[in-house]
Image: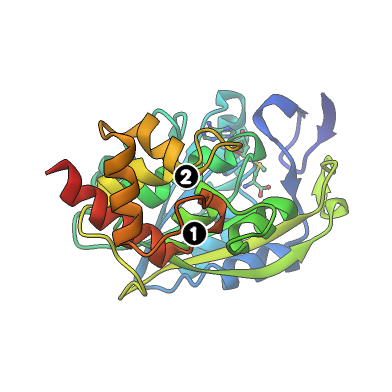
Amino acid sequence: MKHKKHSYGGEFHHKHSLGQNFIEDESLLNQLADLSLVTKEDCVLEIGPGFGALTKPLAQRAKQVVSLEIDPTLFPILNVALEHVDNVRVVQGDVMKTDLHTLAEESFGVECSLRVAANLPYYITTDVLTKLLVTLPEAKSIAVMIQKEVGDKLLSQPGDEGYGPLAILCQYFCEVRRALDVPAACFTPPPKVDSSFMVLERWTEKPFSADDEALLLRLIKGAFAMRRKTLINNLIACFPIDRAQAAAAMDAAGLDAQCRAEALSIGQFCSLCGQIGKTLS
Ligand code: SAM
């Protein structure tokens, strides 16, 4: 737990357990807000405002901002920091327990052009990204600071070490870019690892798409459930189908019977999803 005398008076105890690694460099914060693609047309959902350091440059660029923060001890500081910023609403809550679609709708109405921006708490990166991708389809972009190594994962391709459900979900729903690498020294307190600011822009037209996305999500999760097993064994474990049916679906999707999930491209996952859908119907 680090103690920090912040510019709003008093002392704040950074909570490592909440991923509280804050950014203070104003030029970096402005750069991140620029990279978040936010314009005056956009409403922004920010996760974890901390002291409000990124909230302010986002608010300058956006129509409106809603910032969701779990830590109640930050609220007196946020109230002072954002005192003269009139287009920000700060809400207390846990991003994993909040209905983000409802929060955005209540804050901005139904017609808003929504973007997400955050210096994410790293202990929930995968869960937050998955939740944003799956439950907030109206978000046009998701711009997030995450561990550099996780950024590598998001960009990984079939056969790469980090290739798995997170990379597939991100790339299925969005065009993924690493916008900036940010060294650990830019944070207070500095985390143990370097970071990357990643920008995920939702495809207006997906390069590959599945008719049944709920089934695709189930397939992606199930295919990697037992990493050491072949795809066919994971399919049998995940769906109510026997070996012959799984083999036929794989064959119809043009897949080798012995292949593993980590070798499949997103297009191949979509084809297999179509075949499994037929088998199940
Ligand atoms: N935005 C600030 C900045 O860039 O300096 C703070 C970023 S800090 C990496 C992550 C923030 O997320 C902290 O303020 C932390 O309290 C908050 N946080 C952690 N877990 C959260 C959760 N489950 N839901 C919402 N906010 C959370």
**Image quadrant of residue 101?**
top left
- Given contact means CB atoms under 8 Å apart, are the residues at marks 1 and 2 in contact? yes
Residue holding disc 1:
264
Q: Nearer the viewer, mark 1 or mark 2?
A: 2
**Image quadrant of residue 17?**
top right
The x, y position of residue 251, in whole percent, is 34, 58
**Image quadrant of residue 267?**
bottom left
Q: Quadrant of the C terminus?
A: top left
Q: Nearer the viewer, residue 144 or 33?
A: 144
Q: Which mark identifies residue 13?
A: none
Question: Please, which residue is most extreme toward the left here?
Answer: 281
- The residue sitting at 66% across, 40% down in the picture is 122
Quadrant assignment for ligand 1:
top right
Q: Nearer the viewer, residue 15 or 182?
A: 182
- The residue sitting at 80% across, 49% down in the picture is 187
Do we see residue 63 in this rendering? no
Does residue 182 appear to the left or right of 201 in the view shown? right
Q: Amino acid at mark 2?
A: Leu
Determine crowd level at label 2: few under 14, some 14-19, many 20+ residues with C-alpha closer than 10 A: many
- The residue sitting at 25% across, 31% down in the picture is 240
Beta carbon of the mark 2 residue lies under 8 A of ligand 1: no
Does residue 230 appear to the left or right of 114 in the view shown? right
Q: Amino acid at mark 1?
A: Leu
Disc on the earlier residue, 1 or 2: 2
Do we see residue 215 in this rendering? yes
Q: Secondary structure at mark 1?
A: loop
Residue holding disc 2:
231
The x, y position of residue 198, in whole percent, is 61, 62
Q: Secondary structure at mark 2?
A: helix
Q: Is residue 59 above or below residue 213?
A: below
